[in-house]
């Protein structure tokens, strides 16, 4: 019997981190962001390959393909099922595309994205889902195989697949059970990187290929703006260090990848786990041959954790500092203080570990004074790189509820992103004032002569790094002054 064909894809268009359920970052308008690997598609491909399907995986977006090229490939491949990974920002255009592909080629249609995690009916009513058959709101690798088997082979019970919506025989969408998660992450296959164009996903400074390795899922924090506790759970589910090492080894030996982003909502939350993984790297044949970066929290954190991470090959760590105001940190339920933010920065400087600082402005309670406190923290912490985003009230977050109660929402929260928020402003500042403050702080940080000379000094022997610094610097300035 001929294998059923399945297309997994990101459509052409602006660059978004479609595989990042938490952030869905607008890469085009970020200060120094590069596209991360399409692991959601890779995980889906790996699961479906084990079930005997013919797979085509295409990141049309990052390859800068045209719509014409996409349609040509789909016409030639003629998939029986297609899965598109969508974002809150691109969902309207993505659904128009799904509708057109359904009309032209007639495949089973699946939309995957955080927007469909136990969604409000009022939000679904805003979308033309007339040509959509399934929506995956949870983790794709725990759902796509069962959906394909049911839709293409008539096997299984679709109502038993967690965290999805499906179209019933009468055309009505039914919800399955949400807020349940697969526990055994070691049993999941690694992303099918042989189907991914790994050269597309690179370190911003060196342009070397960089693979994303998901080391854990879930976050116990209560940040009011974050989707993760809802989608991936409040209990952190770790992969074993041994399982992570197997994936690292496969990436290095099979695909020649030396650089890695360890994707976890809070990579350093379990110091013992980090120490075990780093020790395994140090004692392995990969030591000195691979490098990695990871996200972290300032609390909990130990200096010793940063030290062993650097020894194992960590070239950068990223902190969500968010705010320089203890009042705001408390209101957003960050579970950290300004003092802890500064302590984490101090330890990085002492260890010699470069770090990113991520900040958010425009929360409902913020005044100009609060944002100036964030500016002060940025200069005191002195990160190597920063990003400042504007608070974004995703459906399903406490921030959305607050903005709704305070009358700070635009008519529709869909179609917005971290640089074009769906808020009308804070209780004390207009959105135009927030945008201008963001621009002023970013320019004030990156255009400091001492910063420019320091970065130039760091890459004297690496012309390609210098070129990339210049490229991202120009991109930053252009984005900040673009209407």
Image (cartoon, rainbow, N blue to C red):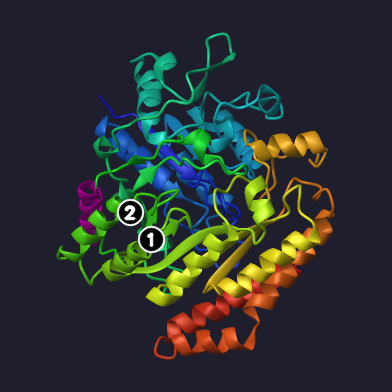
Viewed as shown, does residue 409 lie left or right of 103?
right
Q: Where residue 103 sits in the image (x, y, percent)?
A: 58, 29
The vertical placement of 159 against 426, above or below, is above
Q: Which residue is drawn at 46% across and 45% down?
A: 73
Q: Which residues are drawn in magenta?
A: 241-254
Report whether residue 483 is seen: no
Viewed as shown, does residue 241 lie left or right of 418?
left
State whether the magenta stretch is mostly helix, strand or loop.
helix
The answer to which of 347 and 82 lies nearer the viewer is 347
Quadrant location of the C terminus in the rendered image: bottom right
Q: Of all residues shown, which one is farthest toward the front?
A: 339
Q: Where residue 448 sits in the image (x, y, percent)?
A: 64, 84
Q: How far apart are marks 1 and 2 (CA)?
A: 8 Å
Q: Residue at x 32, y 46 (%)?
A: 191
Q: Residue at x 68, y 30 (%)?
A: 127
Q: Earlier in the sequence, mark 1 or mark 2?
A: 2
277 part of magenta stretch: no
Residue to which mark 1 is pinned: 302
253 part of magenta stretch: yes
Total labels: the figure holds 2
What secondary structure is found at the residue carrying circle 2?
Answer: helix
Q: Residues within 10 Å of mark 1 (few under 14, many from 20)?
A: some
Q: Where residue 402 sits in the image (x, y, percent)?
A: 73, 37
Residue to which mark 2 is pinned: 271
The vertical placement of 148 against 204, above or below, is above
Q: Are marks 1 and 2 in contact (CB under 8 Å)?
A: yes
């Amino acid at each position: 019997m001929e294998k059923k064909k399945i297309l997994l894809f990101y459509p052409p268009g602006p660059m978004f981190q479609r595989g990042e359920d938490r952030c869905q970052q607008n890469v085009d308008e970020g200060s120094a962001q590069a596209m991360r690997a399409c692991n959601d598609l890779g995980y889906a491909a790996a699961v479906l390959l084990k079930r005997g399907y013919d797979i085509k995986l295409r990141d049309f977006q990052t390859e800068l393909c045209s719509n014409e090229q996409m349609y040509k490939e789909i016409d030639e491949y003629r998939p029986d099922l297609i899965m598109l990974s969508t974002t809150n920002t691109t969902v309207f255009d993505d659904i128009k595309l799904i509708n057109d592909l359904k009309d032209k080629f007639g495949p089973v249609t699946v939309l995957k994205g955080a927007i469909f995690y136990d969604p409000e009916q009022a939000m679904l009513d805003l979308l033309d889902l007339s040509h959509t058959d399934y929506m995956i709101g949870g983790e794709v690798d725990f759902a796509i195989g069962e959906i394909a088997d049911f839709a293409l082979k008539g096997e299984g019970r679709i109502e038993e697949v967690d965290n999805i919506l499906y179209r019933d025989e009468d055309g009505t969408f039914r919800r399955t059970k949400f807020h349940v998660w697969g526990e055994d992450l070691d049993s999941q296959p690694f992303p099918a990187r042989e189907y991914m164009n790994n050269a597309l996903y690179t370190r911003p400074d060196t342009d070397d290929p960089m693979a994303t390795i998901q080391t854990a899922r879930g976050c116990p924090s209560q940040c009011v703006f974050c989707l993760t506790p809802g989608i991936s759970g409040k209990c952190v589910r770790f992969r074993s260090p041994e399982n992570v090492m197997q994936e690292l080894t496969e990436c290095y030996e099979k695909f020649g990848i030396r650089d890695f982003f360890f994707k976890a909502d809070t990579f350093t939350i379990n110091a013992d786990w980090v120490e075990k993984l780093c020790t395994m790297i140090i004692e392995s044949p990969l030591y000195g041959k691979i490098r990695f970066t990871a996200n972290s929290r300032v609390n909990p954190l130990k200096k010793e954790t940063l030290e062993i991470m650097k020894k194992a090959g960590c070239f950068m760590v990223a902190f969500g500092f968010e705010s320089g105001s203890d009042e705001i940190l408390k209101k957003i339920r960050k579970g950290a203080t300004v003092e802890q933010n500064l302590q984490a920065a101090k330890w990085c400087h002492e260890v010699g570990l470069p770090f990113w600082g991520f900040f958010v402005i425009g929360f409902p309670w913020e005044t100009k004074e609060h944002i100036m406190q964030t500016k002060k923290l940025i200069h005191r912490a002195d990160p190597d790189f920063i990003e400042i985003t504007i608070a974004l009230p995703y459906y399903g977050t406490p921030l959305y509820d607050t903005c709704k109660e305070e009358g700070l929402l635009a008519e529709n929260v869909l179609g917005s992103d971290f640089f074009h928020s769906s808020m009308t402003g804070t209780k004390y500042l207009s959105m135009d004032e927030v945008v201008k403050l963001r621009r002023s702080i970013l320019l004030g940080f990156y255009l400091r002569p001492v910063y420019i000379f320091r970065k130039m000094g760091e890459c004297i022997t690496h012309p390609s790094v210098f070129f990339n610094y210049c490229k991202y610097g120009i991109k930053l300035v252009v984005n900040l002054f673009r209407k």
